[in-house]
Amino acid sequence: MPQPAKSKFDKEEENEFSFKELLVKSANYLPLFVIFLVVSFAVALVYIHFQTPLYSTSIKLLLKDFNTKGGGQTVSDQVLPQATITNKTNLTNEIEILKSAALMSRVVEDQQLNTVYHSVGKVNTFELFSTDPATKFIRFSAIKDSSRYYTVMIQVDEDGNIYTLNGDKKTKVRNHVPIVTPSYTYVIDIADTKFYQPDNKYTATWVPTPILAAQLASTLNVYPLSKDATILIITTTSQVPVKSQVVLNSLVDEYSNFNIEQNNQFADNTIHFIDNELLLISDELNNVENNIKTFKQNNALDIQQEGTQEVGKAQELKDKLNDQELQMNVADMVGKYIDNPQRKYELVPSNLGISDVTLGGLITAYNQGVLQRQELLKTLGEQNLQVKTLESQLDDYRSKIMESINNIRALYTNLYNNADTQYKTVLSQITTIPEKQKQLIEIERQQGIKEKLYLYLLEKKEEFAISRAAATAKSNSIDQAQSWGPINLKNSNVYLMALFAGLGIPLLIVYLMDLMNDKLTTRQEILKNTDAPIIGEISHFADQERKIIAGKTRGILPEQFRIVRTNLRYFLSKDKTGNCILVTSTMPGEGKTFVSMNFAAVLAVSGKKTVLIEFDMRRPKISESLDLTKESTDLAAFLTGDFEPSKIIRQTKQAENLFVITTSYVPPNPAELLLSERIAVLFSYLKNNFDYIVIDTPPLGIVSDAKVLAEYADLSIYVIRQRFTQRRQVKTVNDIYHDKKLPNLALVVNDVKAKGIRGYYGYSYYSGGSYGYDYSFGYDYSTRKKSKWQKFRAFFK
């Protein structure tokens, strides 16, 4: 039945990708989906069974912000430059310290983690770890090259005998007896052999500290609890949760010790500096005191209290002079310390009474760089570019510190000179004091300076000693490390992934197959690509023999041709005689001749006098298909001769009212024959003597014979073949339909396979089609049963 033409908009919309259509097509590949689902779930079961569980372990670390304590600064804050603590703890820096391999190296050495134990089973290998020393069945010692790996593999049989394995070599060894090798010595120390399975192999691998520390540090994840909190959460994942707990607990302890050591470095270094200076000052003080004693012994003085006012003023200026000289001495001590080449890149004492902000900031920055250099040297050599760059920065800081000290000393010297001038002026005004007494006063002033400096350094040493003893960690763990259940053995997720894979992969395969397939498969595809109406659909025919079968009374195939005959009422006038029906296709092999013969036969058995004309003169096949002998009076002879049309019309054996005009031999010029004026004579005769004229023409996609004969046709039947005709060819048919290059064009879909993975109706697992018939019988009317293999092969055709 003719269908209304669709708009351009409708066509474009239909040609878009349709997920619903893909799902419908996927129903044809149900066995593929079943296979993939079974395989996916089988893989999931195997994966779950053999997967090594991973456990998550975490610990919370509280960072104390010392400079925000209520009640003011601590002694440590007053006397030590807190290189690692600022006004607000820098969480980013602390996170990097916690994740550093240097800090983890301390953990490895403290917990003796260098030896890693494994149980090697037939399928999986598991790491063994326990806090019980008895579980460490191999102990390494006397390692000559600590930068290499060393592995020992053992096996314990059912009788408790111990063997070492080296490739295929198996050597029996004794328990608790040292075994010496050229590179190391090890002792097998198994407490109870019954805990070792005979089928398993056990390995002990000595791993270098830097490598193991880097491996453990790489598994750490450190992040703050919240934006404003100073609580850090440290997590790690491993196969052995007990080992992770030991590592995290030890890491927090080592981090606290690290910070205490960092703080104590300043105190120790400053105390050592003060001790050295005290020795020098003590010697100088002894010399001054001896000078006073000698002077008094040699000069008997009777000091009278005269000029009391001038003496008091002189004493005041002397104290001021002593203070300035003390500052000068402290500045000199720090300057000598900095300028000493043997103390290069050592921590510089600070807070010794020099109240200069610039100098304090430079020393703090310098000390931070010194600490950073010490950490780098733990993992890098002195010639490393990063170390050299840092040393260059430290040298620059040293120059700036010396420049700042020189400026401070110049300032103190200027103040000292002013005070000294005033002191001498006042002292000269006291005339009642003898010259000897003045000399004694000067010597005693030197004694006072040395005593004051000595006492000042003793006080500073006591402060630093107190701060060192009172040093506490700037962090502590809130609780012990805890491990949680396996994080990778979520069976529901694995099964869900298997479900997605079992459905998604075949769905993708179906989509790609459909994308690469350029053949027409479903009825919907035909309707998408052309507006031409479909007049009938002919099922797949398993028998390759070309013959007329439409004359039979039973079977789906004759019924389908009858449907085509019935649909003629929508295209041809009911009362008209001599209706001419042209049958063509795009390419050879689409079943044009087969449809022509059977369509003519079904018209004939209805009582209509029908003639079939074989105008496909390049490949004539109708004579052979109808078991007719070749005659010299054929269509080609008529077009070149002058005899009557009745002489080339032949009666068939298949139907009483079916006649044919065949081409017995291939003419040399079939295209020119179609231009013969006798064609008009032929069609005039046939239309007057027959009810229906069926023309079998050559394929339109190869030659244009069908267009030449179109002027005599009342109806054009265009044959397309499912799973054979290309989609782009159907678009050409649509152009022919709209341009009316063939009159009254209608489609017949041949070789329709309703079921199977390329079913015509797109839902092969549902019975029936557009007419509700079961097309699985095709043209084979025999009652023999097909084998399962034959049914399986037929499904995938």
Image (cartoon, rainbow, N blue to C red):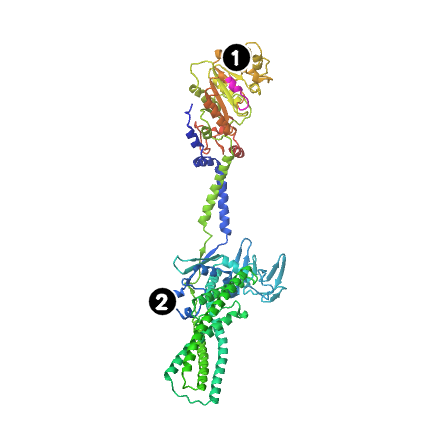
Q: Is residue 384 visible?
A: yes
Q: How many badges with numbers are in the image?
A: 2
Where residue 714 appears, as percent x and y from the top left, is: 46, 17
Residue nearer the viewer, 475 or 119: 475
Question: What are the residue bounds of the magenta stretch?
Answer: 701-709
Where residue 676 appears, as percent x and y from the top left, is: 55, 13
Whether 703 is among the magenta residues is yes
Q: Which structural element holds mark 1? A: helix
Depicted 151 relative to depicted 317: above or below: above
Residue nearer the viewer, 337 or 190: 337
Q: Is residue 537 visible?
A: no
Quadrant for the N terminus in the image: top left
Residues under numbered marks 1 and 2 in contact, where contact means CB atoms less than 8 Å apart: no
Depicted 224 relative to depicted 605: above or below: below
Nearer the observer, disc 1 or disc 2? 2
Where residue 26 appears, as percent x and y from the top left, is: 47, 36
Mark 1 and mark 2 lie on one chain; the one further toward the N terminus is 2
User: Which amino acid does the dot numbered 1 rest on?
Assistant: Leu
Neighbor class of circle 2 (other Cα within 10 Å; few <14, some 14-19, many 20+) is few
Point out the residue furthest to the top here.
643
User: Which amino acid does the dot numbered 2 rest on?
Assistant: Gly
Q: Which residue is mark 1?
A: 682
Residue nearer the viewer, 175 or 141: 141
Quadrant assignment, res 452: bottom left
Where residue 658 appears, as percent x and y from the top left, is: 51, 16
Depicted 148 relative to depicted 451: above or below: above
Quadrant assignment, res 622: top right
Q: Which residue is mark 2?
A: 70
Q: Which structural element holds mark 2? A: loop
